Amino acid sequence: MRKLKRLLRRLLLSVLLIIMAIIIINTVSYSSKQISVSTFNKFKISDDVIQRLSDITKITTTSYPSHVDTAAFLEYHSYVDSIFPLVDSLLKKTTVNQFSRIYKWQGRNPNLKPYLLMAHLDVVPVEKESQTLWTEPPFSGKIKDNFIWGRGTLDDKVSAMGILETAEILLKENYEPQRTIYFAFGHDEEVGGKNGAQAIVEYFLQKKITFEYLLDEGSLILENALPGLTRPLALIGTAEKGYCTLNLAVNLEHGGHSSMPPPETAIGILSHALATLEDHPFPAAISQNAQELFDHIGPEMSLPNKAIFANLWLFKGILKSQFEKSAASNAMIRTTIAPTMLEGGVNDNVLPTNVSATINFRIIPGQTSETIIEYLNKTIDDERVKVSRINASFSSEPSKISSSSSFGFNALQKTTKEIFPQSVVAPSLVITGTDSRFYEPVSENIYRFMPVQLTNDDLKRIHGIDERISIDSYKTMITFYYQLILNSSI
């Protein structure tokens, strides 16, 4: 018996030593996917760009589901045409549905496939109740403390302005691209993009125009993005999550007086269903998109985080648990469940017969809205809770995953390393919706990235209070687009 125990101990020790050896070898050989680039000398950008962004922020191109603020969008286009005279006169302009714009910058080599830079011109409304909480009025365009304040300075008029400023600079330098460049600016992204981006894509399809790659808004450069990563993380979105909104309804034959409640009420049944979903989230999954992210950031991690990423065969559970601790990183590895609205009841002494809840789902690649409905029915397991779709304007399935080795990704990666040399560049999954979801028919390589470096606290400003961008960040954005055009037009 003692010999058997010694043999088992030796066997266990041998197994542990083998595992340790594999962990060490994998960690040591875990090679970086970051590229080396030549030193980039930033050029001086006039302070005039700051005043122009301030002026454009004052134009309230706000999106509403019910109507378009015609005067605001006409004012926007009139102002843009006046401040970018070379863009206005030398690029071909096409107007789509009155307020969306396409620009074509003809390249010298017609054999090269064009590429497309995108943005949207509309902004979300500001709640009346929150206006007093802003440091500066939301449509003031105030220039203060080295920031430009106001709606659109992060989402997303700033991108449109940055692209146009860049084009105007290059045109003044008599620059002629080898590869044709298109700009496309939709006017209703914040309410679904049906009359803007979707109509623009229909125009491209009619003209049989397809693109080598396209760049839209999406991910950013984040400081202190993950534990163990000390450098800023530049996330280039190679895919975006799907968007699905469902209704959970309970309809009982009898309600009654609140003085004689039955053991189960409509509200109780619905509440139990919601609690069940909260207790049983969708399983975390390391998809192709997540794996590519890990492969790019893992080698840049400090120990022991690097060892975890290098040995997912052993530490996958630990990594998932770490990502689950943050709402942002958790959303990158699972379909999320977000109850957003409840409805039911007419008086405090009446038991309602009909109650409902609206739930928003952001779907990871590999799942669909149909699998979401199947999961809900199976998890809730109560025939009294009826699941149905809501035809929200944003509804979409998860996008395809674009290549992280294409011409477009390489141009973005190179440009990012040139302009943000300390950053770690990685493919990522965009957890919000963008206009780019309409563009799959015209390009296989769709990327979502805004060249702005922010803190996690700054993320709250997007669609929130005190939206702003620093003067330095905006000038750097223009520098990025300038270099991206040079790197792409070959």
Image (spheres, rainbow, N blue to C red):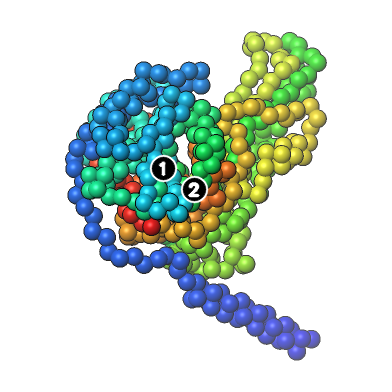
Left or right: residue 200 versus residue 418 is right
Pointer 1 with pointer 2, Cβ within 8 A: yes
Q: Amino acid under label 1?
A: Tyr
- Residue at 60%, 33% in the rendered image: 395
Q: Amino acid under label 2?
A: Phe
Badge 1, how many Cα within 10 Å: few under 14, some, many 20+? Answer: many
Height in image: 477 above or below 360?
below
Location of residue 345 (image quadrant): top right
User: Which quarter of the image is occupied by the C terminus?
Assistant: bottom left
Left or right: residue 242 versus residue 181 is right
Circle 1 is placed at which residue position?
A: 182
Secondary structure of the residue carrying tag 2 is: loop
User: Which quarter of the image is occupied by the N terminus?
Assistant: bottom right
- Residue at 35%, 30% in the rendered image: 151
Height in image: 292 above or below 126?
below
- Residue at 33%, 54% in the rendered image: 486
The label shown at residue 211 is: 2
Query: How many angstroms separate mark 1 from mark 2 (CA)?
Result: 9 Å
- Asked if residue 308 can be seen in this view, the reply is yes
Q: Earlier in the sequence, mark 1 or mark 2?
A: 1
User: Percent from the top left, x then y, of residue 336?
Assistant: 60, 41
Q: Nearer the viewer, residue 417 or 164?
A: 164
Q: Nearer the viewer, residue 24 or 476?
A: 476
Q: Nearer the viewer, residue 319 or 147?
A: 147
